[in-house]
Amino acid sequence: MARVYETDDWNQYRMDYGQPHKALEPIENEIAVVDGALRVLCEEGVLPHARYDHAKMLAHRAAVRDLFEIPWTAITPRMQRLLYAVSAIRQPANLIAAGVFCGNTFISSAGAAVGPGACYTATNLIGVEIKPEEAARAERNVRRLDPTGVARVVAADAVDVVRDFNGPLHLLYLDADGDKGRGKGIYLEILQAGHDRLPPGAVVLAHNSVNCAERMKHYLDFVRNPSMMRASVNVIFDSEGLECSVR
């Protein structure tokens, strides 16, 4: 069984999809909620500690607001902060994000290593988007924030990218939708494609653990099996949710 971190207001705290930068609560509340999630992730061994630079996180947020074209997003400010914090704490050299749409979710993680929110140096930060026109927009967005090319977006099938990646995979973020009715059920196929290259301590983050839980059932069974992943925590502080698992 996965441990659950759940706030009392998770079902009332909802994103205005068309206003990606709108504040939904006082910043002190946002920080406290995310800090609570980080403490649980530490207790379960997903993270080694809960410390990250709040000022750099806000610098990252400001850069995304100023530089990114975001037609809509379900990523709440709480989720943006948590994704950034996990990367800032774990500092993955190699990261793949599957299903990045316009690149907002991808850069929430990658922004801990590139741009004004950078707090460490990464090797490969790869966002994957199967729709070429969306991948092109995401790549344009990322290039505005990261001229170095360490973070980049490719138009491809995430299963193929993960399967063919050469080297250890330190963080895998899942937000893709499969075809033929698979939807978020594709998460398991993507994870299995790279499971053997997750070193001890590697983190896998799966968005929509609340609103798509039924479609993700087989994935959740997999990551909550201690023979497959050492621990898993379902973070429920908005109506989407995030399953956080560690190898």
Image: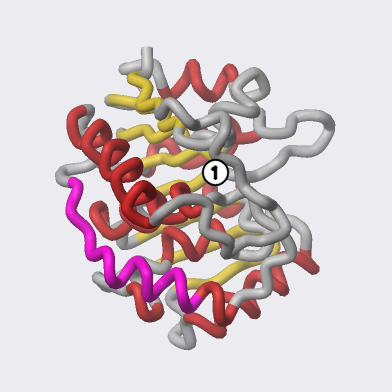
Q: Which residues are magenta?
A: 50-63
In the image, 215 versus 14, the foreground residue is 14
**Residue visible at 34% across and 70% down in the picture:** 113
Count of numbered tags: 1
| Residue 116 rendering spot, x and y as whole percentages | 36, 80
**Residue visible at 54% across and 50% down in the picture:** 76
What main secondary structure does the magenta stretch of the protein show? Answer: helix
183 shown above or below 69 = above
**Residue visible at 66% across and 33% down in the picture:** 184
Q: Residue furthest top?
A: 1
Color encoding of the figure: secondary structure
**Left or right of 106: which side holds 32?**
left
Q: Residue furthest right?
A: 180
The magenta stretch spans residue 25? no
183 shown above or below 48 = above
**Left or right of 49: which side holds 38?**
right
| Residue 197 rendering spot, x and y as whole percentages | 37, 43
Residue of label 1? 174
In the image, 25 versus 247, the foreground residue is 25
The magenta stretch spans residue 61? yes
Determine the image quadrant of residue 133. Answer: bottom right
Rendered-image quadrant of the C terminus = top left
In the image, 178 versus 8, the foreground residue is 8
Determine the image quadrant of residue 112. Answer: bottom left
**Residue visible at 47% across and 72% down in the picture:** 151
Rendered-image quadrant of the N terminus = top left
Q: Amino acid at mark 1?
A: Leu
